[in-house]
Each structure stands twice: as C-alpha cells, then as structure tokens.
Image (spheres, rainbow, N blue to C red):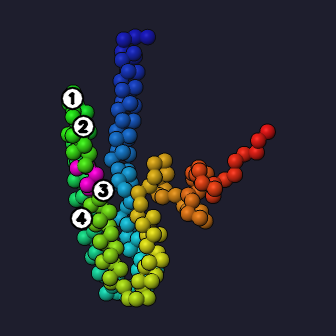
Amino acid sequence: MSYFNRNKWWGIAFLVLLALNIATLSAFWLLKDKRNGPPPAQRSGVVDFLVTELGLDSAQSNTLKELNEIHQRDMKEIRRNNREAKNSFFDLLSEPTVTDSVLHLAAENAVKYEVETDMLTFRHFQKIRQLCTDEQKEKFDQVIKQVLRMMAPPQPGNRNGPPQRREGGRPDDGPPPHRDDKEGPPPPPEK
C-alpha cells in the first residue's frame, strides 16, 4: 500500500470518529432535560390531579397554581444550597486530617437542607388544605399520601418513579422485609 492510500484511510477513520463524537455530544445535549428530574408536565400533573380529585373551582385552582410556582422556586433554592453543602462536605476528603467535629458540623450543615425541604413541603400542603372547603378537606386527607408518592423522586434503578404499592402497603419490587415478630412469614419446615 502506498503512503497516500494509507493516510487516506486514516483520514476517513478520523472523520468517522469525529462524526460519532459530535453525534454523541449532541444527543447528550439534546436529552439533558429528560434527565434533570420530572418534566414540567409531570409536575403540573400533581396540580391537575389535585384540582380534579378535590373538585377545586377556578379561583382555588388559580391560587393552587400560584402556590405551586412559589413552592417550586423555593425548592430550587433549597436544592442549590443542599448541593453546595454536600459538595463542601465531600471536599473535606481532600484534607489529610479532618477532625470528627469538623466532619460532624459539615454533615449537619448538609442535612439541615433536607429538614428545610420537609418543612417547606409540609407548609405548602398546609396552605393547599386551607384553600379547601370542609368536603374538599376530607378528600384532601384521603389523597395526600398518593400525591406525595407522585412527587417522590424515582428510586435508584427505577426510572419510572416510586414503586407501585400492593395491598398492605408493600412495594411490588420484592419480598417483604424480614421481621422477628410473630407476624412474619413462618419458618421453613425442618427436614
């Protein structure tokens, strides 16, 4: 094979690899929104679900949408702070000697944002419940756990959201946890 033919094949191989890299990076860039949490349509699905299930009128529905927008904005800020606190916590890995008190303080700082998330979510639903009439409050009390499951992030390995619950509250994704009390499954027969 001559020198020019050999270089021609290397050039073609280079261009093919370059095209594949561009296609891969483009796919990652175009699909990044699908990986960053539930899409706005799914988040509004919770609002639509509440409007339908509770039978909210238009004024209640508009107020619910405003409350939801405020809640999402506040949650975004807490998530950002939580991410920064966790990054600071794991940045301590680069330090050769870290005292337990410094580590404990950094861990507490990261965990406090999880508490803020729970408090903010509780207050958010408390405001939604206050919008309701007495009949709607009864229905709200019945569906709130379902709403919370709808809002839960997907579990690792399950990209479709939280596991579906069987009768008795057990997820469909495996056997019940072992319990030492008398309500657990009977022991296997001895041979």
Mark 1 crowdedness (10 Å alpha carbons): few <14, some 14-19, many ≥20: few
| Residue depicted at x 22% and y 50% | 109
Q: Residue furthest right?
A: 191
Q: What is the three-letter code of the residue carrying label 1?
A: Thr
Asked if 75 appears above or below 47 in the picture, the reply is: above
Mark carried by residue 74: 4
Mark 4 crowdedness (10 Å alpha carbons): few <14, some 14-19, many ≥20: some
Q: Earlier in the sequence, mark 4 or mark 2?
A: 4
Q: Earlier in the sequence, mark 3 or mark 2?
A: 2
Residue range in magenta is 109-114
Name the front one of labels 1 and 4. Answer: 1
| Residue depicted at x 38% and y 51% | 35
Mark 3 crowdedness (10 Å alpha carbons): few <14, some 14-19, many ≥20: some
Residue 175 pos. (x, y %) = 61, 51
Mark carried by residue 97: 1
Taking depth in this image into account, of 171 and 112 the one nearest to the observer is: 112
Q: What is the three-letter code of the residue carrying label 2?
A: Asp
Question: Where does label 3 land, which residue?
Answer: 114
Under tag 4, what secondary structure?
A: helix
Question: Where does label 2 land, which residue?
Answer: 100
Name the front one of labels 3 and 4. Answer: 3
Distance from disc 4 to disc 2, alpha carbons, whole Å, reads: 32 Å
Q: In terms of secondary structure, what is the magenta stretch mainly?
A: helix
Q: What is the three-letter code of the residue carrying label 3?
A: Glu
Judge whether residue 111 is colored magenta: yes
Distance from disc 1 to disc 4, alpha carbons, whole Å, reads: 36 Å
